[in-house]
Structure formats: C-alpha cells, structure tokens
Image (cartoon, rainbow, N blue to C red):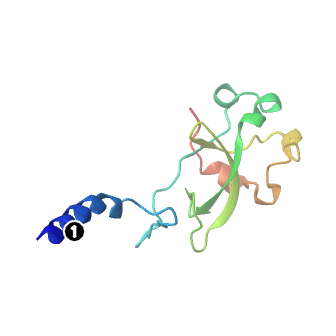
Amino acid sequence: MRISTLALILGAAALPMATTPAAAQVTGSLRIGGHGAALTINSYDANKYGDWHTSYRHWSPVTVYTLNGQYYNHSVRGARAVQVYRQNGSYFMPPRDDKWNGFDHRYNYRHRPNDDDYNHVHPGT
C-alpha cells in the first residue's frame, strides 16, 4: 500500500511537467482555402514616414506578394513578389523619386513595385 501511495504522489507531481512544451517542439499553421488576410499597403508619405534622404534607415525592407491587387505577407500561388517597406507595423511603397533608385543598398530593386502596384495602395495616413 505504501508503494502505490508513493507512486501516486510521484505521478501527480510529474503531471505538470508533462504539459510544458519541450525545447525542440515545433509549431506551425495551415491555411485551408483562401489566401489569408490581405495587407494594407500605403503610399509613401514624407509627413508620416519622414523624408527618405534621412529616414530610410529606420524602415525595414520586406517582400510581400501581390495577386489581383491584394498584398499578402506570404507566398501565394500565382503571386508576384514586391519589395516594400515596413515601419511601426505599417507597410508602404518606396518613394517614387528618381534619385531613390539604387539609394538603399538593403532594398531588393529586382522586386520594386511597378505602376500597377502604386495604383493599388491606400493613399497613406
């Protein structure tokens, strides 16, 4: 009887440890149908994002994917990669100034937006 009581106590003590995630545990997500939530991409606005000559260092270049005028943060079948910027949770197109081309060495100019991309964004603010 003593052994079964001890085993019960040890088993109850080990139960909380069995429910904690292991260090090598992997999590993931699965999208079933649709493409998920579309991103809002804004136009570049110097009043909101700062003058590009000095503020671009605070922007993070990111690749989004466009399909039928919608933008997604993950690859979608048939979508085209477009490089935009992100700052404080807001996504926006790069400046359209001719002097911008080649200015930011972190930016992937092969995926720069085309005219159609600039026509499918929110005006900003």
| Residue lying farthest to the front in this orientation | 2
Image-based side of 3 in relation to 54, left or right: left
Q: Quadrant of residue 8?
A: bottom left
x and y percent of residue 100 in the render? 84, 41
Residue at the top extreme, as displayed: 47
Q: Residue at x 56, y 40 (%)?
A: 89
Up/down of 80 relative to 98, above or below: below
Q: Is residue 20 left or right of residue 99?
A: left
Q: Nearer the viewer, residue 49 or 4?
A: 4
**Disc 1: CA contacts within 10 A as few (<14), some (14-19) or many (>=20):** few
Q: Secondary structure at mark 1?
A: helix
| Residue 49: x %, y % from top left | 67, 31
In-image side of 66 versus 97 (left or right): left
Residue at 68% across, 63% down: 81
Nearer-the-camera pick, 105 or 47: 105
Across and down, in percent, residue 23 comes to: 50, 61
Amino acid at circle 1? Ala
Q: Residue at x 50, y 56 (%)?
A: 38
Q: In the figure, is residue 2 to the left or right of 103?
A: left
Mark 1 lies on residue: 7
- Quadrant for the C terminus in the image: top right
